[in-house]
Image (spheres, rainbow, N blue to C red):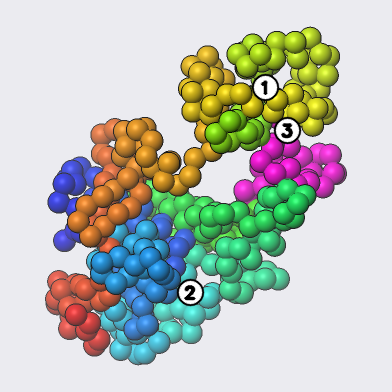
């Protein structure tokens, strides 16, 4: 039995894949949701207290669950198990029969304490099982086994040190970017393990750590530091290697210029009345523009002060200069291209973000509405012919 929305094409890339999602909050559930969007049958297993994100509101959906929970749990069926009890552990083992992927984000060592250690128990019993663990720091090393949270990892791994300006100081990136990337890392790792399993017939452990994901985000700042031995500094919205690559104020709001080469710079200057700047040796090359970025910024700000942002961005993009308005969230979703790319999902009882991975022959599709707490417990255990010890309607 699958949990696909009624308009889902039967030719989903992961159709037939069965996933048990024990994870909570963001990274693990996001990974499982992406698997569900591409056809996997995902069973979400929650503890009696439920996933914490159900209560992280307002705002709340009509079901009473927080909007946060709905963002990463569509396309799943819901089961409630108390894995801290012997009966709950036995129920989990019964559920694992025929499961391809297990995703969990417990503090490392928790599964072993419950008698569900991968190497000693799960792998011998379910040799084809791919076991994905999502954790803060991994299971070993100086920080191994410690709990991890997105903002804390942003701080520890240098991301905050390069985000913000001199006035704000180091600043948390406005989305849980480490959790998001860890979800995608787990998703990629699972697909890699499944591909290898098609040759060997054997599953393996996928280790997705927030620490590793956060460190991998330091491009190009880490490489800059490794080669120059100079500590990256706060630049606001600017780029450490490219200029002009920053936000600039027009008459009615900000735009962002992403000028990468001399050709684009010339087109930009010609379009906004800065042709004379092209004769200034300070700005002949990107290296010169970087060294004189403050002087260049002043010239650009004066030139753009008479332009409206949306028409200017359209004109610049039309002549090959990357530029875009700095939109609000509502403005971003109101863009015609957002609708064209199907990045908004709206249906009875559910609003969400569309599927970012586009496949031509086996396209993904947003799955059914997120499960209510324990909604499918009885039905799922009935499928396996095993009566659950804990049933929630």
Give the left or right position of residue 195, taking residue 378 as reference.
right
In the rendered structure, find residue 303 and report the number of the disc placed on it: 1
Whether residue 220 appears in this view of the structure is: yes
Give the left or right position of residue 345, taking residue 27 as reference.
left
Give the percent coordinates (x, y) of residue 49. Answer: 37, 82
Check the image and report above or below for 260 versus 138. Answer: above
- Disc 3: which residue: 241
Toward which corner of the image does residue 87 lie, by quadrant?
A: bottom left
Q: Nearer the viewer, mark 1 or mark 2?
A: 1
**SS at mark 1 in the image:** helix
Q: Are marks 1 and 3 in contact (CB under 8 Å)?
A: no
Give the percent coordinates (x, y) of residue 286. Answer: 75, 22
Q: What residue is drawn where x is 56% and y is 36%?
A: 253
- Disc 2: which residue: 106
Q: What residue is drawn where x is 34% and y is 67%?
A: 60
In the rendered structure, find residue 157 and report the number of the disc placed on it: none
Q: What residue is drawn where x is 48% and y is 84%?
A: 113
Label 2 environment density (alpha carbons within 10 Å; few <14, some 14–19, many ≥20): some
Q: CA distance from mark 1 to mark 3?
A: 23 Å
Sequence-wise, the earlier of marks 1 and 3 is: 3
Sequence-wise, the earlier of marks 2 and 3 is: 2
Label 1 environment density (alpha carbons within 10 Å; few <14, some 14–19, many ≥20): some
- Decide which of 224, 54 is in the foreground and name it: 54
Give the left or right position of residue 381, taking residue 351 as reference.
left
Check the image and report above or below for 160 versus 311. Answer: below
Q: Which residues are magenta?
A: 216-243
Sequence-wise, the earlier of marks 1 and 2 is: 2
Quadrant showing the C terminus = bottom left
Whether residue 128 appears in this view of the structure is: no
């Amino acid at each position: 039995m699958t949990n696909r929305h009624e308009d889902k094409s039967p030719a989903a890339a992961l159709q037939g894949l069965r996933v048990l999602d024990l994870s909570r909050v963001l990274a693990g559930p996001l990974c499982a949701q992406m698997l569900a969007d591409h056809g996997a049958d995902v069973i979400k297993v929650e503890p009696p207290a439920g996933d914490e994100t159900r209560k992280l509101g307002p705002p709340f959906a009509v079901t009473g669950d927080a909007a946060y929970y709905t963002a990463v749990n569509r396309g799943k069926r819901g089961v409630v198990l108390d894995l801290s009890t012997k009966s709950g552990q036995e129920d989990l083992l019964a559920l694992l029969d025929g499961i391809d992927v297990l995703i969990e984000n417990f503090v490392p060592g928790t599964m072993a304490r419950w008698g569900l250690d991968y190497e000693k128990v799960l792998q011998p019993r379910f040799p084809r099982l791919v076991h994905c663990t999502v954790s803060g720091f991994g299971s070993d090393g100086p920080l191994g086994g410690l709990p991890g949270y997105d903002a804390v990892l942003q701080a520890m791994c240098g991301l905050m040190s390069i985000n913000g300006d001199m006035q704000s100081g180091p600043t948390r990136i406005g989305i849980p970017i480490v959790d998001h990337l860890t979800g995608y890392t787990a998703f990629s790792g699972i697909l890699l393990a499944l591909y290898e399993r098609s040759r060997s017939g054997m599953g393996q452990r996928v280790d997705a750590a927030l620490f590793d994901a956060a460190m991998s985000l330091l491009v190009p700042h880490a490489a800059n530091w490794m080669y120059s031995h100079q500590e990256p500094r706060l630049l606001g919205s600017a780029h450490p290697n490219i200029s002009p690559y920053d936000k600039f104020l027009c008459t009615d709001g900000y735009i962002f210029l992403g000028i990468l080469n001399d050709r684009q710079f010339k087109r930009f200057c010609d379009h906004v009345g800065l042709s004379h700047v092209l004769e200034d040796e300070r700005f002949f090359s990107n290296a010169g523009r970087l060294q004189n970025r403050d002087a260049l910024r002043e010239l650009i700000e004066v030139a753009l002060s008479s332009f409206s942002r949306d028409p200017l961005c359209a004109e610049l993009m039309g002549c090959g200069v990357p530029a875009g308005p700095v939109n609000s969230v509502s403005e971003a979703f109101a863009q015609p291209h957002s609708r064209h790319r199907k990045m908004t999902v709206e249906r009875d009882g559910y609003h969400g973000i569309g599927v970012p991975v586009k496949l031509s022959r086996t396209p993904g599709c947003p799955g059914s509405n997120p499960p209510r707490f324990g909604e499918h417990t009885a039905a799922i255990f009935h499928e396996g012919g095993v009566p659950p010890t804990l049933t929630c309607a």
